[in-house]
Image: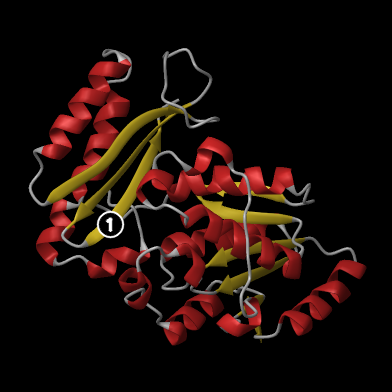
Amino acid sequence: MKVFTSKHELSGYLDTLKEKGKIIGFVPTMGALHQGHLSLIEIAARNTDCVVCSIFVNPTQFNDPEDLAKYPRPIDADIAMLEQVNCDVLFLPAVQEMYSGDEQWSIDLGYLERILEGRFRPGHYQGVTQIVKKLFDVVQPNKAFFGQKDFQQVKVIMKMVELYSMPVEIVMCPILREEDGLAMSSRNIHLSPSERVEALALSKTLNSTRENFAIKPISQLQQDAESFLQNSEGVELEYFEICNAETLMPAESKDEAGLVALVAAKVGRTRLIDNIIIK
């Protein structure tokens, strides 16, 4: 695996591959890798000729300095995992490599950044799009791979790609779960053993919503889910929504083409998100 810390050197190397007609796949991450990330690398490897993974804990997408400070950064373990799945290239830039001085960034994402995650993390998607745009500009991938767990983020990045007419295909890859159903996340490391058990309320609720979809109206499914989570030990619910999978607006009818249920909650001091595609 080749490791680059410089934008200039990475783009120079990738240019030589593109000249040979190679298809470049890209998996941007913030490190603290787990099997979910590795599944993205593996999917990218099956669909492209060269897989680039970036590890960069992006300061502009944290609206809580404490959250940024405690974000795990086990870089040696991350590199070992990437080598295990035969990742071709790692881009490991410093903050000053990606940001110069006093940069301004604003993109009109419309209602997408005011709902769900946007409502609870104001400014978050401005930070996400700012860094993903920078990374896309350096790597210029043919395809970029993102996890379904951050469902709204995928929609936001698709919107950004559309606004900037960027020639990259966004591929959303399935959520990987622990054996007990908990969605894999870099944040799970912060859960105590008892919180780890309490966190299962999220996936249980999502599964129950999907199982009961045929027999209960949307309003009842929503109510049941909120009630269960609000009464779950150790869980502080932020939102549970059943949405149109394309627009992320609240679902009005079971006949809509695609539906997704999304949840966010704090378990102890750890904020978790999860979702399930209902249809």
Q: Nearer the viewer, residue 220 or 60?
A: 60
Task: Classify residue 209 by image quadrant.
Answer: top left
Give left or right: position of 88 versus 142.
Answer: left
Above or below residue 34? Residue 116 is above
| On screen, residue 96 above or below 110 | below
Identify the image quadrant of residue 9.
bottom right
At horizontal 29% and vertical 35% (from top left) the residue drawn is 240
Viewer-side residue, 250 vs 104:
104
* Residue 122 horizontal/vertical position (percent): 42, 52
> Residue drawn at (59%, 56%), measured in percent from left and top?
129
Q: Position of residue 260 (x, y in %)?
A: 42, 31
Residue type beneath disc 1:
Arg
Q: Position of residue 137 (x, y in %)?
A: 75, 65
The residue carrying mark 1 is: 271
Q: Is residue 235 left or right of residue 243?
A: left
Look at the picture and state if 224 lies above or below 112: above
Determine whether, in the image, residue 240 is placed left or right of residue 255: left
Q: Residue at x 69, y 61 (%)?
A: 25
* Residue 148 in view: no
